[in-house]
Structures are given as C-alpha cells and as structure tokens.
Amino acid sequence: MTVTQDKHITLIGAGLVGSLASIYLGLRGYKVDVYEKLPDIRLEDIPAGRSINLALANRGIRPLQQVGIMDQVEKLLIPMKGRMLHDEAGELQFQAYGQRPEEVIYSVSRAGLVSLLRDEAEATGNVTFHFKHPLVDVDFDKQNFTVEDAMTGKQQTLSYDILLATDGAGSPVRQFMEAAKVGSFSSELLEHNYKELTIPADQAGHFQIEKEALHIWPRGGYMVIALPNLDGSFTVTLFMPTDNGEASFANLNTPEKVETFFQTYFKDAYNLMPNLTDLFFDNPTGVLGTVRSEKWFHGNAMIFGDAAHAIVPFHGQGMNCGFEDCAELNTLLNQFDDNWEKVFPAFNEARRENANAIADMALDNYIEMRDSVRDPKFHLKKSIAFE
Ligand code: FAD
C-alpha cells in the first residue's frame, strides 16, 4: 500500500541525480514538483550537456536496482570489460578490470538514462516536472523560492515544505547558501579542459575499435579516452591543459594544428575521425572542477549530487556517487520515519567524507591515467581508471 506523505517536496534540477531522487521520493508517497531550467530532452533535441555518455559502476547500479528499474536500464548499457591502452605507434594493450564476469563497468548514454529516469519518476504518479523553469531565488528564512517561466519571463514565488537541490556543479542553491553563510564551500577549477569528439560507426554500422572496452590514449600531460555508444560510435574525449604548451587548447587554434596534433600523437584514432576538425571547433570546450561543501542543508533546504560535491571525471564516479546519495537519503528516511529534521544532519554526516575522499581519488587518478604510458606495467596494475 502506498503511503501519502504530509510534506510536499520541491526539487530543483532534473539531471541524473534529481531524476533518480524524484523516483525514490515518489515511491515513498511524496508529491514532488521538479523545476528544471532546460527543455525536456525527451521532447526536444538538445545537447545532453557535459558528457554524452558515462561509465556506470556498481555504486550507481545498486540504487537503480533498489527502485526496480535495472531491467530497463540494462537495455541502454554496453559492458566495458577493461581498459584498452593505445600507444603512439597504435599498439594495443588490454587490461581486464577483473577475472570474474561481473567485474565490468558499463557505458550508458546520458540522454537515454535521464529520459528513462524521468519516465519512471512520472510513472510513480507523484512526480511533476516543470521544464524551462529555472530557479532564480531562494529565501531560506521565509521558506520560499522563485522560479521563472523561460517562455514568458514571468516569475512566481512559491513556498516550500522541503526544498532539495540537485542543480549541478554550478548550483544556484549552493550559491544562495554561500551568500547566507551556511558553512564553508570551495570550488576549484582544474587547469585542464575537455573536448568531445566522435569515432563514427563504419558504413555497415559496426564499431571500428573494440566495443567492450574503455579506450585510453595516455600521453603524459594529456590524454584521450573513448566510450562506446549503442549506435556503433564512440564518444571520444580529449583532456588537455587549458593554456600551457604545445598540447593545450590555447595552442590548438587552427584546423591545421589540430590535424597535425592528432596525426602525431593519436594516429590510430585520427584515422577513424573524418570530421575531427569540424567537431573540434563546433563542440564546446568543457571545464572541470571540484566542489566541496561543509554543510549541505539550511533550514528545510538541502543540496546533494554535484551541487554539493562535483568531482573531476577521472574515476567515472560523479553520477555513481550522486546515485548513492539518493539511496542513502532513502535509507535515512526509513531510519528516521521521514523526520527531515533528523535526516538532514545525518545525511550530511554520512555522505560528506565519502564525497571528499572520491574527489581526491579522482584528482589523483587523472595523473595515473594520463601517465600510464610512461611505465605501462606498473601503472596498469595500479591504475583504477573509471571504476
Ligand atoms: P547535473 O547532471 O549537472 O544536473 C543538474 C541539473 O540542474 C541540470 O539538468 C541543470 O539544467 C539543472 N539546473 C541548473 N541550474 C538550474 C536552475 N537555476 N533551475 C533549475 N534547474 C537548474 N560520472 C560518472 O559517474 N561516470 C562517468 O563516466 C562520468 N563521466 C563524466 C565525464 C565528463 C566529461 C564530465 C564533465 C562529468 C562526468 N561524470 C561522470 C560526472 C557526472 O556527469 C555528474 O556527476 C552528474 O551529471 C551529476 O548529476 P547531477 O544531477 O548532480 O547534476
């Protein structure tokens, strides 16, 4: 029997974490209104934002199993059984993640996963999404928030019982908490950026490199990785310094330089990327950073997911960690009989250290991944890329 909760939930941000959180809350019997600044990717062809695909690992799978949607998620997954290292001569070295068949991670499309999560949230009968409705203000003392209808520009101020914010690394709600001096927050940008490119499927629609692997081209100060997509393509990501030296985004400012750079250092990948320079200059250059927050709640409002603890992607754990947040929140709601006053501090306590630890490991792992070319045997044993 579904229980109906007396408190209403306002959720800001319908990304991966907010969409999963709304399933948990809808299943608990909460009426949830989710405000999202972007259009709905299920209806409009918009960029998925950030990475096109991601590595899903056990930490992220357990919550998906818990809400009972793993059967549908499985249709979106491609197993990656290990890393395939590419050296400059195009020699390959495969390293399995483990000996047992279950020791794999999975490549999943961000747009596909978030669409499924939103469908499942709506299927609870308790969750309503309001797309193109950015949050523009929160008043924690008066317990109200203001959203804008992006189509009309009209703003509306509404009160909240519980406000949860999963509004991402640049979280406006976190910024309002900072302004309210809730605790200490830090945001550190990495001096490396990223660019997404594509290795398309061949003419018959087949994968052009090993399908069931996470490919890495480690080159010391920079690297390229590639994850498979269901349509036979690979999403390729170049990670490189922003503005320091030959291998930097500042230096690669003409099609000729981009061609020469890829031909020289990533020859086997270069040969599979016919649209390299178009994509390089058409696609945005993404920034990477680490967010740490001491106190995640203020009154009846709380941040989690990237909003509280964005990390660099070199462990492939940002989404996975955010999914774990959702499961932990549910556990604590069980433990404290939905008494949010008790849940907020317990959640903060339970998750903060984990989040800080994975943030540090992700920063360290960038060096491991891009350096593994120098001493492949040592680093391959030690390297823990993306799991
Ligand atoms: P987001 O996905 O950022 O969602 C936040 C949502 O809030 C967005 O929909 C946004 O539009 C909305 N929003 C923002 N402001 C407002 C506002 N004012 N009002 C209303 N809505 C608002 N993680 C992994 O686990 N595995 C990986 O392999 C992996 N690879 C990555 C590769 C790259 C290049 C990057 C950059 C990240 C990667 N991550 C990976 C991390 C992962 O993308 C994030 O951890 C994850 O997206 C966090 O989800 P979220 O819902 O907290 O935030």
Image (spheres, helix red, strand yellow):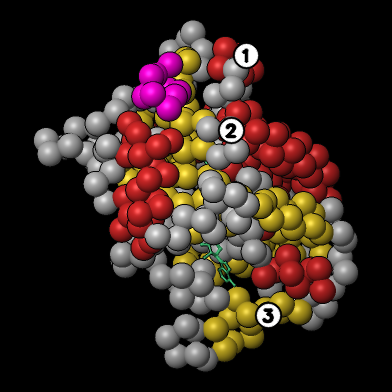
Judging by the rendered image, the residue that carries numbered circle 3 is: 137
- The percent coordinates of residue 342 (x first, y second) are 83, 51
Of tags 1 and 2, which is closer to the observer? 2
Q: From which residue to which does the magenta span run?
A: 84-94
Instruction: Name the secondary structure under disc 3.
Output: strand
Amino acid residing under circle 3? Asp
Residue 226 location, quadrant? top left
Amino acid residing under circle 1? Phe
Of the image marks 3 and 2, the number of the one nearer the N terminus:
3
Question: 28 or 257: nearer the eye?
Answer: 257
Of the image marks 1 and 2, the number of the one nearer the N terminus:
2
Which class describes the residues within 10 Å of circle 2: few (<14), some (14-19), or many (20+)?
Answer: some
Which class describes the residues within 10 Å of circle 3: few (<14), some (14-19), or many (20+)?
Answer: some
Judging by the rendered image, the residue that carries numbered circle 2 is: 220
Judging by the rendered image, the residue that carries numbered circle 1 is: 378
At x 43% / y 27%, what residue is drawn? 88
At x 70% / y 34%, what residue is drawn? 364
